[in-house]
Amino acid sequence: MISTRDLSLLPEMSQLKLLAQSVAMLDAIIEPDWALRYRSFGAHWGTDEVMASVRNGSGDGYFILFNPGGAILKGVPHEWVRLKERTKSTAVLA
């Protein structure tokens, strides 16, 4: 499991960026209406920055900001607390 304590399962930043861009493109082909898509990729988010995101309509999602200094990943698994209580897990999602 990927956690803030062990990032070894994350792909290299360039691979993650390409994967995020690819699945967002597939999503755009399948669903032309942006409001109905799960995945998006902003190639011109800011100066030297691009953004990838996923939202499922139920509160789960992530946001990745890529820039020359690295990347920032923010994930929101809204039901994680309930899952954590059921499994007694101490893992922290990234």
Image (spheres, helix red, strand yellow):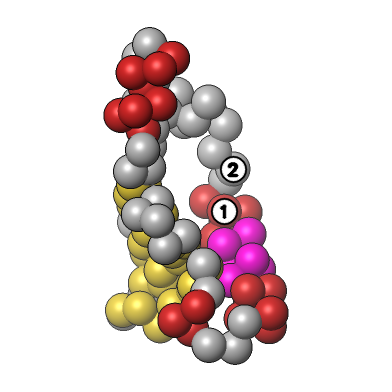
Q: Residue furthest bottom?
A: 32
Q: Which mark is residue 92?
A: none
Q: Earlier in the sequence, mark 1 or mark 2?
A: 2
Is residue 32 placed above or below 42 in the rendered structure?
Answer: below
What residue is shown with label 1?
16
Give the spatial CA distance, label 1 vs label 2: 6 Å
Residue drawn 45% across the image and 24% down it: 6
How many callouts does the rendering have? 2
Label pair 1/2, CB-CB below 8 angstroms: yes
Residue drawn 52% across the image and 68% down it: 39
Q: Relative to residue 17, is residue 91 drawn left or right? A: left
Q: Which residues are magenta?
A: 19-24
Residue 7, x across and y down, in percent: 47, 30
User: Which amino acid does the dot numbered 1 rest on?
Assistant: Leu
Q: Relative to residue 49, is residue 15 drawn left or right? A: right
User: Which amino acid does the dot numbered 2 rest on?
Assistant: Pro
Asked whether 93 falls inside the magenta stretch, the response is: no
Look at the image and tell me in which quarter the C terminus lies: top left
Check disc 1 and report its element: helix, strand or loop.
Answer: helix
Residue 3 in sight: yes
Residue 92, x across and y down, in percent: 35, 26
Q: Relative to residue 34, is residue 70 drawn left or right? A: left
- How busy is the neighbourhood of tag 2: few (under 14 within 10 Å), some, or many (20 plus)? few
Check disc 2 and report its element: helix, strand or loop.
Answer: loop
Of the pair 9 and 27, the residue shown nearer to us: 27
What residue is shown with label 2?
11
Residue 78, x across and y down, in percent: 33, 43
Is residue 75 placed above or below 1 in the rendered structure?
Answer: below
Residue 87, x across and y down, in percent: 44, 14
Residue 73 in sight: no
